[in-house]
Image: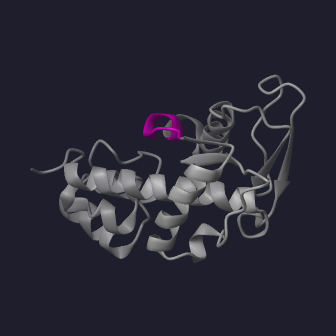
Amino acid sequence: MAAAVILHPARPIRGLADSKVLAPDVRERLSMVIRARALAWSIAWADREEIDALNILQATLLAMRRAVLGLCIAPHVIQIDGNRCPSIAGLVPGCTAVPIVRGDALVPAISAASILAKTFRDAHMRSLHELFPQYGFAAHKGYPTPQHLVALSEHGTCPLHRRTFAPIQLALAMHLDPVPSR
């Protein structure tokens, strides 16, 4: 998941911060405010097949490109959280991209984008939990927590699991059933 946000300079949003340090209920509240006050916002993603084919970094950069292209207003400068930028040459004429390490804690627009991406991801994981409750997606959000690893050992993999994710490769190497038990 990735998001792009163009904040309205006359409508500042109090409380923007690195999404990782905000409580889930605060992120949800801020997400609604961001959507209401921003000049433009967009959320995009790369799917499991793209992540497996490209690798997680390239799929993340693809999701970032999609988020920028989804904006209803063309940005002049794209500030990216991290040390790498997606290739935008020719996609947004005259636009430059600037990587900012720890940008989600330093730049309000990056904080806003991080909040939108994380709340969208969390909602998506809750919906996937409804389909495959045995994996606990609503709780661990896809991270390799002990709960997730136990679920993999008990139930094998499901169609949502990335085959290039190390715990999945381990599960497959141990000849666990690649189809979820029902």
Left or right: 116 in relation to 147: right
Residue occupying the point 33% across, 68% down: 139
Q: Position of residue 124 (x, y in %)?
A: 38, 50
Determine which quarter of the picture holds residue 66. top right
Q: Nearer the viewer, residue 19 or 125?
A: 19
Q: Nearer the viewer, residue 53 or 130?
A: 130
Left or right: 81 in relation to 52: right
Left or right: 27 in relation to 3: left
Determine which quarter of the picture holds residue 87. top right
Q: Position of residue 103 (x, y in %)?
A: 77, 63
- In this rendering, is residue 152 above or below 3? below
Left or right: 177 in relation to 34: left
Image colouring: one colour
Residue occupying the point 76% across, 67% down: 102
Q: Is residue 69 magenta?
A: no
Residue occupying the point 29% across, 57% down: 174
- Stretch of the chain drawn in magenta: 45-51
Q: Nearer the viewer, residue 97 or 107?
A: 107
Find the residue positioned furthest to the front: 10
Q: Position of residue 163 (x, y in %)?
A: 41, 45
- In this rendering, is residue 40 above or below 82? above
Figure disc tally: 0
Q: Position of residue 99 (x, y in %)?
A: 83, 53
Residue occupying the point 64% across, 73% down: 15
